[in-house]
Amino acid sequence: MGVRLYFEPDIKDPLMFVGWPGIGNIGILAVKTLKDILGAEEFGEIEAWEFFYPQKVTIREGLLENLEFPTNKFFYAKLKGKDILFFIGEEQPSEGGRGYGKGEKAYRMANLVMDVGIRFGCQRVYTSGACVSLCHHQVKPRVCAVVSSKELISEAKGFPNTFLMSELEDRSEGEGVITGLNGLLLAVAKMRGVEGMCLMGEIPDWLSGAAFPYPKASRSVIEVFAEILGIEVDLHFMDEMERQVDEMVEGFYSKFPPDMKKEYDKRKSIAMERPGTITIQAQIYIDEKFKKGGESSGEEPI
Amino acid sequence: MERNRFEILQTLKLENPCLLIGWQSQDFGKIASTSIDFLNDHLEAKIVAELRPSGFYSFGGVKFKGNIVQIPETKLWASEKYNLLILKGEEPEFEHYKFINTIIDLANQFGTIQEIYTLSGTISYIPHTFERRILAVFNQSFLKDTLLSFGLQGMTWEGPPAINSYLIWVAKRRGISGISLWPEIPFYLAGRNDPEATRSVLLFLKRRFRLDIPLSKLDIEIMQRNEKLLRFRNENSEVDQYIQRLEKGLVLDEKEQFKLIREIEMFLDLNQ
């Protein structure tokens, strides 16, 4: 029970990039895209049944052929003398009806991920996620960094388009919470003597509940990843996805009442202290638009 | 194995027993509860253990049904005469994997389980005048070859899994054969009991385990139910028309289906 490695990859002291789904799927999209760019090879997984209810069953002519669970996979890549390890989890475990990425199961999963990292000598782990802020969707998202020790602050400050949480106007103490496993992993890594950094792409607060990804922010995070690895990445393949999302977002934006739009557009040049009613109204609009259908799809589980 | 998850009420040892499982939740046609209650009554089964609910349910309040408070109960009975263990329970809300393993661990306390059978109804668009086939899912192919001769039909399906599929999948990983039985329930009887579907399940179990169980009472119940529904069809031409269309293999639209369900349920409630 736990981790299953299909083979022992020839890697040593790798940097580890880890992603789970979250707001706008910013983190997982960034990590998954980097994994694909580097052509990383799958070499193991965390067995899912202890953590998740299966998503799909396949029964053929009376025989139960397969039960599919959310995947939790390890990949590795070798890059100019640097070994890279990836972990991508399709879902965050929940426990006892509480929110995702909380509780004993999440803690256990974080430790299993670190078990594999430490086994190969990993000393640095990067997670990613969303930084919900009072930014404007037409402005390039920045990347917000939270690090596991003071020593890493100057390093994070050197990344392009990146700021520290304490640089946000209402977070001068640099305090806050990174919810879910993208945050919890940093804590587990720190407890186990591994340095960690969470790089979060900015997403406007009113879009944080939307049921679509926010690739613009993922792109900003990937650019920081590229800087960390000292590589150049061509992200043109993300243009189409970004265009589609932008079209949707602009569609909502175009329906803002003039006063709301005027107020919101101030974000292009100044940071607001706290969200006004504009944000709340827009959020409600998004939630209604993307409200999921009822559970009764007409099919009962077998 | 965590022994504190269950309470043994009576100690006894069976020899490689088979385990029958029925869930009271989502019990279409009340197949599971009526079949299990029937078996416990007729097989001299004794209650032997109970699962502790803590950790598997939200307990954010309490459910009630028929004005009576319901608590999630999962109990195990044993029939020494037929070497059978019988479990009736409430599907968990959380920790399904742990719950399933706990059930298997609990049953193993009374003898190493050889086979697991789950009983649940599947909603079908057949009319009540048609035979209730039992669709079956096997976790191992040799079982399928053996048991299809009992008149079961192999099911083909892809989609979200019920706990029974998860259960027989876990059973296979633990080296236990598993079969889930899915008798067809006419959709308009799904919310009430369907004695004919219950009978088809009990008949299968009677043959499979050579049970000495009388089905005559059930036959009378089926006859009475069919007579009632025939009378209702004669009184209500719309209902008759809907059922006739189902008998011809035609499909009712959603509105017609709801109407038929409502009419039949109201009629059965008034004519119990």
Image: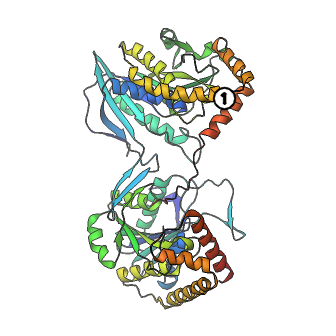
Question: How far across and how far down the image is residue B217, in percent?
Answer: 52, 90
Residue A32 visible in rendering: yes
Going by the image, does B162 lie left or right of A266? left
- Image vertical order of residue B194 relative to residue A105, above or below: below
- Quadrant location, the N terminus of chain B: bottom left
- Image vertical order of residue B148 relative to residue A160, above or below: below
Q: In which quarter of the image is residue A19?
A: top left
Going by the image, does B192 lie left or right of B65? left
> Residue flagged by tag 1: what amino acid is it?
Lys
Q: Quadrant of residue B80?
A: bottom left
Question: How far across and how far down the image is residue B270, in percent?
Answer: 69, 81
Q: In the rendered structure, the residue with mark 1 lies on which chain?
A: A
Q: Label 1: state its secondary structure.
A: loop
Q: Please rate how many residues cluster around mark 1, counting C-alpha atoms within 10 Å: few if below 14, some from 14 to 19, many from 20.
A: few
- Image vertical order of residue B36 relative to residue B71, above or below: below
Question: How far across and how far down the image is residue B175, in percent?
Answer: 32, 61
Question: How far across and how far down the image is residue A153, in percent?
Answer: 52, 12
Relative depth, front residue between A248 and A52: A248
Tell me the residue at 27%/65% (across/down): B141
Residue B48 visible in rendering: no
Which residue is labeled 1 in the image? A255
Tell me the residue at 62%/17% (across/down): A174
The mark tally for this picture is 1
